Amino acid sequence: KRDDPLMQSVDDGFDEGYMVHVSPEGARLNINRLLKSNDKTLLFDLFTKWGMDDKDADQLIGALVDWVDGDELLVLNGAEKDYYSELGYFDRPYNRDFRELDEMQLVRGFGQLQNLNGNWRESFTVWSEGLIDIHEASPDLIAVAAEVDDTAAEDFHQLVLGDDGVMGTEDDIRFSNLNEALDSLLSPPGRREFIAPRFTLKGEVLRVESIGRSGNFRYSIQAVSRSKSAQGDLLDYQEKQLGSE
């Protein structure tokens, strides 16, 4: 379990240790699902929340749609083959789903978003089932997806954490009905038909991140898998050395 003592260990005698963090991948926005569902409102609200002006946000969303839509028809504010060819990129757009988040950086206008939010990767995924885990997503994402203000999203997040203020422990609050959760969030009833389809009560794809340390050496292992599969059904696996402490 996520609060099992075995999830972290420190050996002061040998100056080494590790920490493991488990979270549903649905705590992040599945960029492919958003683009296929044509939920441009959510992306627009997120990008402008991060500081983009309306025009630049519209253009980036159009370029993202053109990147994955599988044809060469230019959508409003989009960017197709002619735009990238003029820059010397003759294989773009890929006209398929994003297979990893780094591909998003190749899209016209994405550099501006990176400059506004260097941690943008923490908000996106390509591995989840597609819906946002209403219990596990960050207050920032909850506010945008549920169309509520930051205070309401933060209050809901604190409620879900329970008395100990820690996610993944026994006192966490879990709703059994999505509309009840949205009511607790004060999400606008008049927009519920658009808001509710963005969410799930529980995601089944898990991200496991483990960081081990020995002296100043730090190493990270990250795995994404379907929790319902008896075999683990590994979707993604990455190892990398981190900067020294």
Image: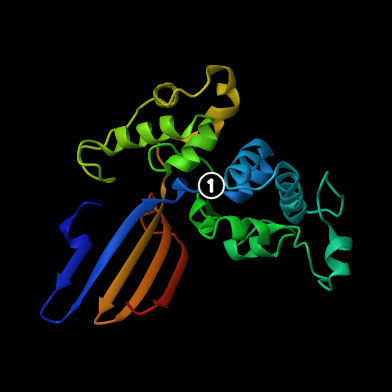
Percent position (x, y) of residue 7? 22, 61
| Residue 48 in which image quadrant | top right
What SS does tag 1 mark? Answer: strand
Q: Position of residue 34 (x, y in %)?
A: 62, 43
Q: Is residue 52 left or right of residue 28?
A: right
Residue farthest to the top, as pictured: 190
Q: Quadrant of the C terminus?
A: bottom left
Across and down, in percent, residue 166 comes to 25, 45
Residue farthest toward the left in the current orientation of the protein: 13
Residue at 58% across / 61% down in the picture? Answer: 101
> Which amino acid is tagged 1?
Leu
The image quarter containing residue 161 is: top left
Looking at the image, residue 2 lies above or below residue 189: below
Looking at the image, is 130 positioned above or below residue 90?
above
In the rendered image, the vertical position of residue 16 relative to residue 164, given as above or below: below
Reading the image, the residue beneath label 1 is 29
Q: Is residue 22 left or right of residue 116?
A: left
Left or right: 206 as drawn, with respect to 160: right
Q: From this viewpoint, is residue 132 visible?
A: no
